[in-house]
Image: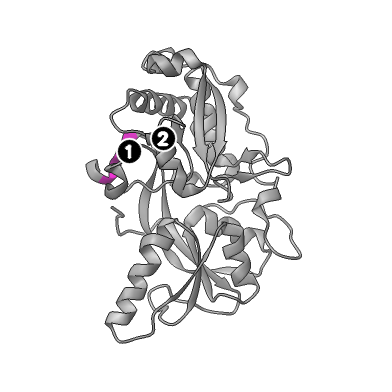
Amino acid sequence: MRAQYLLPALAAVTALLLTGCVDNSTDTTGGATSDSSASEIAVDDAAAAMLPAEVADSGTLVIGTDPTYAPNEFKNEAGEPIGWGIEIAEAVAAKLGLEPEFQVAKFDNIIPSVTGGKADIGVSSFTDNVEREKQVDFVNYFVAGIQWASAVGNDVDPDNACGLKVAVQATTYEDTDEVPAKSDACVAAGKPAIDKLKYDTQDQATNAVVLGQADALSADSPVTLYAIAQTEGKLQPAGETFDVAPYGIVVAKDSELTKAVQAALQSMVDDGTYGDILDEWGVADGAIETITINAASNG
């Protein structure tokens, strides 16, 4: 469950100089090439030894992702998944002596793909929560909060947004939990409900605010701050970051792979690979020092 404390503003990311709207599907800026590319990462033999035999024998780590959430996971001009979350996944595979194989899917299809054995893990900015832990395990690797944004000059208070139009990416926590809860509170207080506008991708939600179709957007803090940077002065933060919670890599429930991924990530923390990736993408404020499992219920 999300803890109620404020996360300091994440470091500013490299701005994509746009004169029009946001299109994360073709963005190639930000993060560039990691100094610790997957090809240069040494295998952690202890972590690799924990792999289930079928995964070790396959030589590949199949990773489910929805690359529509810049800068975490999105696409370059060639349509390939990039972003700091993608680089984390690639590094995990390298630590385990495996080749990463990305399986692009809609966000709400990733957990079923993992539980059904079509993907080994899911890496797509999943917020670890108790409800999701009933289906899968999470290897926690980052903390992020919720951050709203509005058009410059249009001051919006996330705690007083009754009657406003708020854009979200469909199936995210902001869509399924955060904005509905705020809207329900409005109605309970006799005020107008929030008009939640759902979009398939985050860039569509961002564009809705830029074009004046929505009063504000709600997304995870690194995503919102990246969108603000991309729009070159058209958007501004609305309120502070709140509801900080852990991100987790999705693994099938009670799988031996969970411990292997945890060990690989901890090895990345210890040797600096993890920090290098976060630093290059400007999201180091969400870094953690100890890689945990199912932090929502065990934290």
Magenta-tinted stretch = 292-296
Q: Per the image, is 294 magenta? A: yes
> Residue visible at 63% across and 30% down?
35
* Residue identifier under label 2: 114
- Amino acid type indicated by mark 1: Val
What number is the disc on residue 23? none
Judge from the rendering whether residue 130 lies leftward or rightward of residue 250; answer left or right: left
* Residue identifier under label 1: 136
**189 in relation to 220, above or below:** below
The single residue placed furthest to the bottom in the displayed view is 190
Going from the N terminus, do you reach mark 1 or mark 2 first?
Answer: 2
Question: Could you say where residue 84 lies in the image, as x and y percent from the top left?
Answer: 56, 40
Mark 2 residue crowding within 10 angstroms, few (<14) / some (14–19) / many (20+): many
Residue 276: tell me if it is visible: no
Q: Given contact means CB atoms under 8 Å apart, are the residues at marks 1 and 2 in contact?
A: yes
Judge from the rendering whether residue 257 lies leftward or rightward of residue 16; answer left or right: left
**239 in relation to 30, above or below:** below
Question: Could you say where residue 206 lies in the image, as x and y percent from the top left?
Answer: 59, 64
Q: Quadrant of residue 176?
A: bottom left
